[in-house]
Image (cartoon, coloured by chain):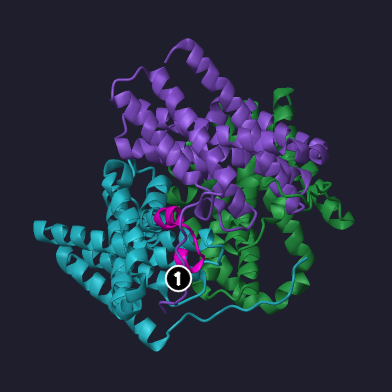
Chain colours: A green, B purple, C cyan
């Protein structure tokens, strides 16, 4: 990875965890949580995907253990959201854009972790998806809802395809940075198009009871 | 363990994860999840118990890391369920039988993992129960329900007693395969009898509030 | 740590897990779980915080693996609660006192584990809070409720401040046992005052939807 790409990915990662913490804070506000609940939900949503990945892959120490200031940044971003909540609605489009960027950036980082551990192809894709999606699943469980991931809007699909392109690009001999840019651009476009046109996976509806 | 027993346990394990993934798919369908949600819930339900056990016992790599095709099999079984959902009701009895078999097979495998790690007796039983039951707990949490395990039908009891008999049989000097067959037969019978006659543990009903 | 302090902390730890298991049993009874559900929820609530901490910090074996009788004690305490449930209301104040003591004792023990692993300051505080609070979060998730922790009564705040005082006291050169007593006394007082006067963190209320 060229130094400049690594640096860019690093910056994108910070943007991503801040945005994830802020969207978590809004979810907390919709359930009238208190300020501590807001901060905790911010930390868990922003850092939970990477933590789940690291626990499953036995990859220690976790990111927030090695860099504890990540806890302060995400808790701080969640708290700051309380102050600017009135104005966030005007930034709605920016938020959705940054949230989509966060998804693909988390995914690529998760793939990188698994590749650095020499994991096989399917585990690389799973690692990307876990990193990209589990934070939101934990947020929804803690808000007592069926995770959005299981119901809507190509979230997991974007993560899987982004990982697939990133991995395939590198295996096909593309320079890492080229594969990275293609994967990020593809994933971001797909997510934004899905949002714009309301694309979603078909649903499975089953009404009988086995018992 | 004789080679033929090991082989049989292996085959039963595959049947078990496929059946668990299929019942998870039906649960997903009752909540109108999309196809990705169906696949994910299938993987998590089928492989979640073993993964929880391995994370708690620090037993890495997890089964689906070492054998990533398990993710494809369980996701595939969940998706296939969508295609044959109309006909599953006619296979209701077969499903309940295979689900009961899955519970006891998972339990015995969980006990084996803990015994191979030289864990003490109580941890062996706990490991069996976690392997047998946690997948269903995760499924119910993700479907936003109080886990069935905590409310019904001797599920956990069957796992605990199966583990107890399996362990006791071996400690009492029985040949491993004999202990295995007795434990599986006992657990399977108990589960099926509980289903047939509606056996359940007494409930604890408490209506006051401490606060 | 003087031997007598260590002994006292050990005794308090046993009181704490028993009380946590008993309050979990009451929560289980309010949802009409069966006896197995009561025992399991007791174990998970009492031992879940420490287990989560150990899994995240890669600190193996977990307490209940090293000391499996902890599973029996907590399951037993939960079951015993069924027998004495009618009389517990009269012990309401004692319960709230012991629950508060449990919170601060768990917190201090969690800080100790992280400090023994040479973790940085923020991770020490997080480890204390996870140990003190996660058991209750798991209980609430399994009871299908938004965790109380995120909504009420300075629970997490008490854990954070207790850890902060405990750590600061030691860094400031206080004898360990003095820092311990001050932290426990402060945390306990704050929790009881919060209960008595209904202190809570301000809530964040947000009603719009981003999508």
Q: Between C197 and B210, which is closer to the camera in this rendering?
A: B210
Residue A53 seen anywhere in this rendered image of the structure: no
Q: Between B58 and C146, which is closer to the camera in this rendering?
A: C146
Q: Is mark 1 on a helix, strand or loop?
A: loop
Q: Between A166 and B163, which is closer to the camera in this rendering?
A: B163
- The answer to which quarter of the image holds residue A74 is bottom right
Q: Residue at x 52, y 50 (%)?
A: B149
Q: Position of residue A16 (x, y in %)?
A: 64, 55
Q: Between C51 and B190, which is closer to the camera in this rendering?
A: B190
C165 vs B128: above or below = below
Quadrant holding the C terminus of chain B: bottom left
Q: Position of residue A101 (x, y in %)?
A: 72, 52
Quadrant holding the N terminus of chain B: top left
The subunit carrying tag 1 is B
- Name the residue carrying label 1: B206
Q: Where is residue B199 in the image (x, y as percent from the top left)?
A: 52, 49
Residue that protrudes farthest toward the bottom in the picture: C197
- The answer to which quarter of the image holds residue A119 is top right
In the image, taking residue C39 as reference, residue C11 lies left or right, namely left
Badge 1 crowding class, 10 Å Cα cut-off, few under 14, some 14 to 19, many 20 or more, is some
- The answer to which quarter of the image holds residue A23 is bottom right
Q: Position of residue C145 (x, y in %)?
A: 55, 66
In the image, taking residue C24 as reference, residue A32 lies left or right, namely right
Principal secondary structure, stretch drawn in magenta: helix
A55 vs A89: above or below = above
Q: Residue at x 75, y 69 (%)?
A: A91
Q: Residues in magenta?
A: C28-41
In the image, taking residue C164 as reference, residue B67 lies left or right, namely right
**Is A41 contained in the magenta span?**
no
C143 vs B5: above or below = below
């Amino acid at each position: 990875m060229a130094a400049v790409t690594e640096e860019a990915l690093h910056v994108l990662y910070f943007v991503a965890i801040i945005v994830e913490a802020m969207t978590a804070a809004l979810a907390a506000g919709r359930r009238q949580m208190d300020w501590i609940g807001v901060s905790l939900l911010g930390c868990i949503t922003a850092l939970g995907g990477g933590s789940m990945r690291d626990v499953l892959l036995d990859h220690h120490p976790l990111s927030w253990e090695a860099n504890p200031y990540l806890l302060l940044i995400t808790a701080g971003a969640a708290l700051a959201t309380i102050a600017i909540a009135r104005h966030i609605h005007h930034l709605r489009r920016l938020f959705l854009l940054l949230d989509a960027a966060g998804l693909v950036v988390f995914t690529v980082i998760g793939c990188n972790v698994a590749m650095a551990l020499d994991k096989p192809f399917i585990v690389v894709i799973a690692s990307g998806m876990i990193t990209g999606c589990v934070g939101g699943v934990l947020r929804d469980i803690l808000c007592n809802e069926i995770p959005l991931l299981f119901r809507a809007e190509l979230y997991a699909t974007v993560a899987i395809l982004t990982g697939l392109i990133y991995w395939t690009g590198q295996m096909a001999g593309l320079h890492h940075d080229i594969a990275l840019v293609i994967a990020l651009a593809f994933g971001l476009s797909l997510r934004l198009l899905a949002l714009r046109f309301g694309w979603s996976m078909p649903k499975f509806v089953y009404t009988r009871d086995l018992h």
